[in-house]
Image: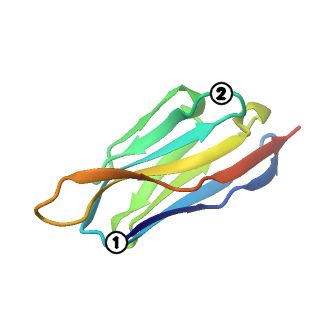
Amino acid sequence: QVQVVESGGGLVQAGGSLTLSCVVSGNILRVENMNWYRQIPGKQRELVATITRRGTTDYAGPGQGRFTISRDNAKNTAYLRMNSLKREDTAVYYCNADIKQTRDSGSWFYWGQGTQVTVSS
């Protein structure tokens, strides 16, 4: 069994900051890439940021310059620091992790249940 659990969402005023966490637990050998996505009501889920196991990061349009992704491999945890939040950042934020469970298996992507971020004006 593998669990991917996000936390840290909530209500914040425009211009404020939040840090989301994503913890992977269960029967895992290694967590490869970890990604943050978000889904705005009525729109498709979109990629926000990605980080490799070595720490290489990449950002999609929504959060470039304002969001920072990081991770702690020892804790199988990824973070998303969001600064200068805007109303349009209001969404459910999801963590997606590429997980290898055994030495002989490939890796598979698992999703968390999401955490709501609401930015008020």
Q: Amino acid at mark 1?
A: Ala
Is 47 rendered above or below residue 1?
A: above
Q: Position of residue 5 (x, y in %)?
A: 53, 63
Q: CA distance from mark 2 to mark 1?
A: 35 Å
Helix, strand or loop at label 1? It is helix
Going 40% across and 72% down the picture, which residue do you hit?
75
Task: Name the residue beneath numbered marker 2.
Answer: 43
What crowding class fits label 2: few (fewer than 14 Cα within 10 Å), some (14-19), or many (20 or more)?
Answer: few
Q: Position of residue 33 (x, y in %)?
A: 33, 49
Q: Position of residue 64 (x, y in %)?
A: 54, 31
Q: Position of residue 23 (x, y in %)?
A: 48, 66
Q: How is the image coloured?
A: rainbow
Task: Name the residue beneath numbered marker 1.
Answer: 74
Is 44 rendered above or below residue 21?
A: above
Going 66% across and 45% down the picture, which residue do you hit?
92
Q: Which mark is residue 82?
A: none
Whether residue 18 can be seen here: yes
What crowding class fits label 1: few (fewer than 14 Cα within 10 Å), some (14-19), or many (20 or more)?
Answer: few
Helix, strand or loop at label 2? It is loop
Going 24% across and 68% down the picture, which residue do you hit?
29
Q: In front: 117, or 99? A: 99
Residue located farthest toward the right when viewing the structure as drawn: 121
Q: Earlier in the sequence, mark 2 or mark 1?
A: 2
Q: Amino acid at mark 2?
A: Lys
Whether residue 83 can be seen here: no
Check contact, mark 2 vs mark 1: CB within 8 A.
no
